[in-house]
Amino acid sequence: MKFLASQWVRNSLSRSLARRLRLSAAERSFPTNEESRPSIVHKRSVDILHDPWFNKGTAFTMTERDRLDLRGLLPPNVMNSEQQIKRFMTDLKRLEVNARDGARDTNSLAKWRILNRLHDRNETMYYKVLIENIKEYAPIVYTPTVGLVCQNYSGLFRRPRGMYFSAEDRGEMMSMVYNWPSDQVDMIVVTDGSRILGLGDLGIQGIGIAIGKLDLYVAAAGIHPHRVLPVMIDVGTNNENLLKDPLYLGLQQPRLDGEEYLSVVDEFMEAVFTRWPNVIVQFEDFQSKWAFKLLQRYRNTYRMFNDDVQGTAGVAIAGLLGAVRAQGRPMIDFPKQKIVVAGAGSAGIGVLNAARKTMARLLGNSEIAFKSATSQFWVVDAQGLITEERSDIDPDALPFARNLREADRQGLREGASLVEVVKKVKPDVLLGLSAVGGLFSKEVLEALKDSTSTRPAIFAMSNPTKNAECTPEQAFTTLGDHIIFASGSPFQNVDLGNGKIGHCNQGNNMYLFPGIGLGTLLSGARIISDGMLQAAAECLAAYMTEEEVLHGVIYPSISSIRDITKEVAAAVLKEAIEEDLAEGYRTMDARELKRLSKEEIVAYVENNMWKPVYPTLIYKD
């Protein structure tokens, strides 16, 4: 009986407990799902971006970015996971369509993706591949493919590379700059995305050009890859398509202008030079409106230069001097060349100023020499020939505006077309920096047949390839084999038959900017002088042998870029020493630099060029 009673009690308790548990389960809420619990991380900054367990990419909120020292390491536009998936799927679908319907620059982009993945996995191997195959892969990591990369960067963006300083970061840049993990940065390439190559305003997507340039600083100049930093200054965009694009990674607001714009760039410059006092900053693809203004604003205070203004000019000068040599004349005859320039943007004006300065120096550097040199140029922009009659003339172009009486004597007027100018002037050189593809039409090329030169030169320097003013095939087909041809982007040589080759010279800035940066770094010069830039250009001009030049080859092969850069850097360093600007680098002080012979300077440069060799690694707690 006792047993039955106890059994009944146990059963009653079990039923009661079960009932209470059921009620409790129905009433109880579970506020924290597993996926919504906060995760404790022991990483910050770049380390967390490289960790697939915790990386959210562009989905990190601004609060998280500040908490985890990520501010500036990601594009400023915060995206949710749905937007990220849409961006990824858009890129994936584009590949599927191209694979089905045929390639449309797909091959180049596919190569870029493969190289970029290697860069993410193994930096040493990436640069070894690039250096040993530079002729093949320079067009992939740099122009022309880099233009395509920039146009599609919001879709291609995977792992962040570089820093982003936006208009919304004003007042924060001095602290943000310490989010970058490296305590030593030797080289920064910065852009505001306003004029990427000849493609216009690409906003934040323009960071692709800064990344590509720094790849060449490492591959060509041997700047250590841990000491380079690509930077985007995001002040908005005036590109209507990007302003409406829900997948755009940058600030979706009109570009800042005037003092507001300057205040952002000023704060950036102060921040990077405060943390890295010895860094060199290369400005890249800023619109003409700001390129000259910023160059003049900073060049006497900071170690900086503008590649579009000064680098393009140096490469063009080297080519122009080479064209004189190709005519069988000494370089001292350069001031006699008649040059028609198509394009009056930052690159065009930069070339004009450098060419005039070179001519004037060869003529004795007097006031009369400058006046004589100026008279050798005819500048044509979108409105035609620039003369003093033009009312809204750009101040930077004003020195090259043709005198009205002089123009009238030649049968020219304000706004005369390019073909009219070529017909009347009969130039030795037709130089294109217009970013207008096909500008050198058959009619313009036909007009050049009347050139007074025995071997006229055509420089179709605009990038990327589709913006070249003409192709080498068009030039040689129209004018025959007695011309010199150079372009900004790579083209194949032209088979002219009967064993003759029409050489296409690539007049690319990569011949100079790596050497300018390396030479400045090793000299310790606090500024980059006109003399240092001139030394770089003249070194490149003299690099080719007489035999090569007479065969129409005025620029060396890209495959020699590392040796070219070494020589250019040595020339820049030597000029810095001669101008008493050199302050030394690391253990080599200014006095020791002055004692070096020319051969020792070249050896010193070579010894300081990083090589992609696996180092021995030692763990330290």
Image: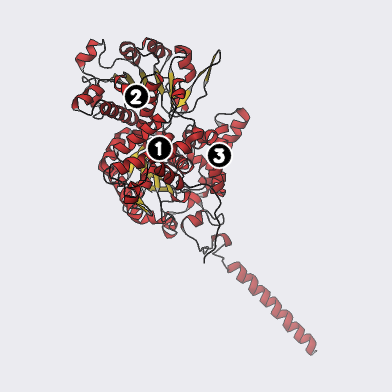
**Residue at which label 3 appears:** 132
Q: Amino acid at mark 2?
A: Met
Mark closest to the chain's N terminus, 1 or 2: 2
Question: In front of the other: label 2 or label 3?
Answer: 2
Question: In front of the other: label 3 or label 1?
Answer: 1
Q: CA distance from mark 1 to mark 2?
A: 19 Å
Measuring from the top left, give residue 537's x and y in whole percent: 36, 32
Q: Residues within 10 Å of mark 1 (few under 14, many from 20)?
A: many
Q: Nearer the viewer, residue 182 or 436?
A: 182
Task: Indicate the quadrant where residue 545 lies.
Answer: top left
Q: Nearer the viewer, residue 133 or 327?
A: 327
Measuring from the top left, give residue 385's x and y in whole percent: 29, 18
Residue 344 visible to an observer of this rendering? yes
Q: Amino acid at mark 3?
A: Glu
Q: Nearer the viewer, residue 16 or 212?
A: 212
What label sits on residue 331 in the rendered view?
Answer: 2
Asked if residue 255 lies left or right of residue 89, the reply is left
Task: Indicate the quadrant where residue 89 lies.
Answer: top right
Looking at the figure, which quarter contains the N terminus? bottom right
Circles 3 and 1: CB atoms closer than 8 Å: no
* Whether residue 224 is situated above or below residue 546 in the rendered picture: below
Q: Residues within 10 Å of mark 3 (few under 14, many from 20)?
A: few
Task: Give the structural element (helix, strand or loop) at label 1.
Answer: helix
* Whether residue 14 is situated above or below residue 2 in the rendered picture: above
**Residue at which label 1 appears:** 568
Task: Give the structural element (helix, strand or loop) at label 2.
Answer: helix
Residue 434 visible to an observer of this rendering? no
Circles 2 and 3: CB atoms closer than 8 Å: no
Measuring from the top left, give residue 33's x and y in whole percent: 57, 62
Q: CA distance from mark 2 to mark 3?
A: 34 Å
Mark closest to the chain's N terminus, 2 or 3: 3
